Image: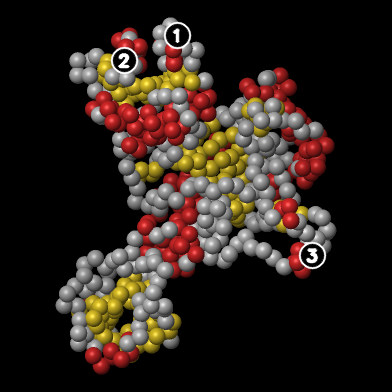
Amino acid sequence: MYRNHNCGELNIKNINEEVMLAGWVQRIRNLGEIEFIDLRDEKGITQLVISSEMKNKIEDLTPESVISVTGKVSERSNKNPKIPTGDIEVIVSDLEILGKSKSTLPFEINSEKADISSVKEDLRLQYRYLDLRNEKVHKNILLRSNVMKSIRKYMDELGFTEIQTPILTSSSPEGARDYLVPSRLHAGKFYALPQAPQQFKQLLMVSGFDKYYQIAPCFRDEDPRADRAPGEFYQLDFEMSFATQEDVFGVMEQVLPKVFKENSNWQVDEGPFVRIPYNEAMDKYGIDKPDLRNPLIIKDATELFVNTEFNAFKDKTIKVIIVPKGGEQGRKFFDQMSEFAVNELGAKGLAWVKVDEENNLTGGIAKFVTDEIKTELGAKIGDAIFFIADEKAKAQKIAGQVRIELGKRLDLLEKNVFKFCWIVDFPMYEYNEDEEKIDFSHNPFSMPQGGLEALKTKEPLDILGYQYDLVCNGYELSSGAVRNHDPETMIKAFEIAGYTEEDVKTKFGALYTAFQYGTPPHAGSAPGLDRMVMLIADSENIREVIAFPKNKKAKDVMMGSPSEVTEEQLKDVHIKVTEESL
């Protein structure tokens, strides 16, 4: 009724055909006797020719209005090689306005003047249905759809079964705040939206399913970041029975390179991916999600400065970053890096030296750095050396951020490539300074390396877990673990973190009970879909790849949520809002 072709498919072979098209008016150009309209739909743009006889039909026509036209395909005299339909135009014989747009738009969408980067994000999100008409944003959502198709195709090929798990479930301490849903039928009780399908997917393994997956919605009441959507996100959640860490790696190393290659023209790492133990990652990169496109490596120089006369280095962990040819930078660059370290990272300072053309050290703290230290560090002519001194954990963290910033400012990152690595051998526990107790450092459902024996005989902070993260270009793409499937080991693991057996029964009752009835060893992981699409789209903002995201304050400014509800609705779920809570 409205169209028999889309706006991206007509070409020279269609000359003299009578066609029907429908779409949005992208641009109207008035050339006197003749007017031209660029008609846009999801597939492309076709130029329409409006003769003087048809002008009365478009007197009130505005950009972004929806129209349907009938006309004959003709060869363009002024061809446009930039678009697939650039060889033709359609001479319109009939035109119908299907949906008129206001003459003034909140912001430009697809005209030559359109620059969404200059539009305030909240305004874009308020009119997200208009924002999604922008070609770049629209393509991101189509890309997301294609990534999901790729994931399903390759997971199905590997014999995984797609199973949906519940959205309304019980509250569970999994590292973030739950979203709670009050029950109407059970006064004073609450459902929780799942932070992840963690317990359900383990229960599916107990149920005898061999390989499970789903593209799962997850809900966490966390503060938003550029790489983390507030409130809800999606992940490729999968679990395997009778599986080890190696089996999980094998799946990821087959599926993800194919998904990335199928949806991007960048170079993609093939499996097996580089494996980096957690402690090594912190020493060499100062972070547990290193960007391997950055060639800089952090070195430890603590022993080289044991007898130093430089007070700022005494009794400190000394981390060093050598920047090849970095000495070519002027003094302003070094001052700006020092300001960044102090103002942005809370460092006490950022010491530096250069190796000049005569292989001598100059600038900064040159008088405190001997030639022997320079030689031991491997610095060469033209290099710059940055020094970070602090207690160990803080020195690692600051050095890690300085490394990242140097990579950005000096444009050192390898271009158009996806570099993956596994971070392995995470500590099972960490010391919680605030609560002054031992706590889980990662996933509480993980199997400790060494099993029950390690839990009984080792110091908690020395125990490693079968836990692993997959990192891509500096983003944590996935977390996973070999699961703790033995009830006795599970109870002991939680006991070390301050939970009693009764706590385990209460908080994880279904798992605890199910594990009494024969549980296979199992393992899994969960790459984040939103983050995956963000990487493939080469976007720095995760909200750009989500159709209807929340803003930076976790608000949906288009729909007006979160919103107030009526007293009657509150009464139905046995809730009363007090003055103190407002």
Which residue is at a point 34% across and 70% down the rendered structure image? 44
The residue tagged 2 is 366
Cα distance, mark 1 to mark 2? 17 Å
Whether residue 404 is visible here, answered yes or no, is: yes
- The first of marks 1 and 3 along the sequence is 1
Q: How many marks?
A: 3
The residue tagged 1 is 306
Whether residue 209 is visible here, answered yes or no, is: no
Q: How would you rate the neighbour count of disc 3 (Cα within 10 Å): few for under 14, some for 14-19, many for 20 or more?
A: few
Relative to residue 522, is residue 115 depicted above or below? Answer: below
Q: From the top left corner, tell me how far across and down residue 477 is, in percent.
A: 50, 43
Relative to residue 567, is residue 208 depicted above or below? Answer: above
> Which quadrant holds residue 17?
bottom left
Question: Which three-letter amino acid code belongs to the residue tagged 1?
Answer: Val
Task: Please state if 84 lies on the left or on the right of 310 as rendered.
Answer: left
Which residue is at a point 39% across and 43% down the rendered structure image? 418
The residue tagged 3 is 571
